[in-house]
């Protein structure tokens, strides 16, 4: 056994277990099949390690230890099933002696499996965080503000769906791989966004979710170093790093959001900014351009500006023009409207916002009214801005967002 120096043992063990969770699950699923049973067994092995390792020390081969314990859990489970005699040969074959396992990382295959097209997006999110991220059901439930029992049912249904779909534990055929990888990237993007700007609840942001999304994006970047898709993988990681760098300045002492233009940039994480800028600079031009690369380039322009006044808005608008051509959507239009306002004036930005008034995807939430309020304020229409801030506050699901928008209305009214 090898004890951890330095950090508290529990913290170091938690980090190690989250790193090993997908590797161990990959070993079991590739060897035994039955993703659902293997995933349950791995969770039990992780729990056993979390209880034993902080005090007893980490095994010399922690991955092998987890594989052995999880495999024995499978044996015990199948032995207890009613059709014991029909499974005797299988159980004998499953007996696992302690020792080192094959040095193979199936994390990418596992990511593809968790993002299987038969699953809904919420199920993909939950299963990715549990099977690849190593989070417990309780942690995932807390992240998405649902009861643990509800999340347990969602994960259970997701595993059953994968089993029913007959999904194989192999990388998708080359013809399908790019499309499936886009789903994986989208799931990681959604995890990060939920942490960056919590859609509801008492906190404006969730550092645990953004950290987990960055960790998984780093892992994916190591697993997909080459090929046409590598540019978007690198772009997503750069976007996360450049956005996460601002987190220390994104809320004030009361936990209320602080707009980008008002943030104390000395509090931004200079190391993450430098890493993100280097990554996107190295990526652009080497691979087919995609939406994550363009969003990362926009974030880099913001992060490299010493002050809000130094922001190169014409460059940002040019990047949004390209982004809207290759990946059009209401959120892109909303953000481009701000860039239009900063380059051509608030009335031009408001005119572009008006094109979204009939889009139900935007009118159900608060962001359209929030941006409109900001641009109306820039245009000198205080009454219009107050009304828009109040509408936005009523529609916001996040409590800090509600308070911030109500305060903006009170400030102008």
Image (tube, helix red, strand yellow):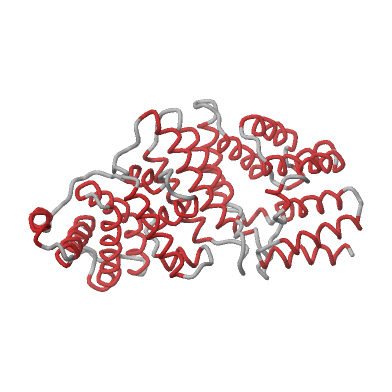
Name the residue rendered at 51%, 67% in the picture: 146
Residue 170 spot, x, y in % from top left? 29, 39
Taking depth in this image into account, of 209 and 116 the one nearest to the observer is 116
> In screen coordinates, is 385 left or right of 306?
right
Snapshot quadrant of residue 160: bottom left
> Residue 328: which quarter of the image?
top right
Image location (x, y in percent) of residue 334: 72, 44
Image position of 337 with respect to 74: above or below: above
Tell whether 110 sits left or right of 196: left
Which quarter shows the C terminus?
A: bottom right
Q: Is residue 317 left or right of residue 125?
A: right
**Is 303 placed left or right of 411 in the picture?**
left
238 and 196: which is toward the camera: 196
Count of labels in the image? 0
Report x, y in % for residue 265: 66, 53
Give coordinates of residue 312: x percent, y percent. Answer: 73, 37
Note whether 229 is above or below 14 in the view shown: above
User: As rendered, which of 111 and 78 lies closer to the eye?
Assistant: 78
**Residue at (45%, 70%) from the top-left corner?**
148
Residue at 81% in and 41% down: 349
Position above or below: 376 against 72: above
Give the camera-side residue of 60 and 130: 130
Tell me the quadrant of the picture where the N terminus can be found. bottom left
Residue at image location 32% in from the left, 37% down from the top? 171
């Amino acid at each position: 056994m090898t004890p951890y120096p330095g950090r508290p043992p529990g913290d170091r063990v938690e980090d190690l277990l989250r790193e090993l969770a997908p590797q161990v699950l990959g070993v079991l699923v590739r060897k035994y099949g039955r993703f659902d049973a293997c995933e349950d067994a791995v969770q039990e092995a992780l729990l056993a390690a979390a209880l034993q390792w902080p005090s007893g020390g980490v095994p010399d081969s922690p991955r092998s230890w987890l594989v052995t314990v999880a495999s024995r859990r499978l044996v015990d489970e199948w032995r207890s099933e009613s059709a014991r005699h029909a499974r005797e040969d299988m159980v004998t074959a499953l007996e696992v002696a302690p020792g080192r396992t094959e040095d193979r990382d199936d994390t990418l295959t596992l990511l593809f499996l968790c993002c299987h097209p038969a699953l809904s997006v919420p199920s993909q999110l939950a299963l990715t965080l549990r099977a690849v991220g190593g989070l417990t059901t309780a942690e995932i439930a807390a992240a998405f503000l649902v009861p643990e029992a509800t999340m347990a049912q969602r994960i259970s249904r997701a595993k059953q769906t994968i089993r029913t779909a007959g999904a194989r534990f192999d990388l998708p055929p080359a013809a399908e791989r790019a499309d499936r990888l886009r789903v994986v990237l989208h799931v990681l993007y959604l995890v990060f966004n939920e942490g960056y700007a919590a859609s509801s609840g008492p906190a404006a942001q969730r550092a645990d979710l953004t950290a987990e999304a960055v960790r998984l994006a780093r892992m994916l970047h190591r697993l997909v170093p080459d090929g046409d898709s590598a540019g978007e993988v690198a772009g997503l990681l750069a976007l996360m790093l450049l956005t996460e760098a601002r987190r220390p300045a994104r809320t004030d002492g009361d936990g209320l959001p602080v707009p980008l233009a008002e943030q104390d940039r000395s509090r931004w994480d200079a190391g993450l900014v430098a890493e993100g800028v280097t990554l996107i600079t190295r990526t652009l031009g080497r691979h087919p351009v995609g939406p994550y690369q363009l969003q990362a380039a926009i974030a880099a322009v913001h992060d490299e500006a010493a002050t809000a006044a130094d922001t190169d808005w014409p460059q940002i608008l040019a990047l949004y023009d390209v982004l809207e051509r290759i990946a059009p959507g209401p959120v892109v239009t909303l953000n481009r409207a701000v860039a239009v306002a900063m380059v051509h004036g608030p009335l031009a930005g408001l005119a572009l916002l008006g094109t979204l008034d009939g889009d139900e995807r935007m009118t159900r939430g608060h962001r359209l009214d929030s941006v409109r309020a900001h641009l109306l304020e820039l245009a000198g229409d205080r009454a219009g801005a107050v009304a828009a801030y109040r509408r936005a506050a009523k529609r916001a699901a996040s409590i800090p967002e509600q308070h911030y928008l109500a305060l903006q209305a009170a400030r102008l009214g």
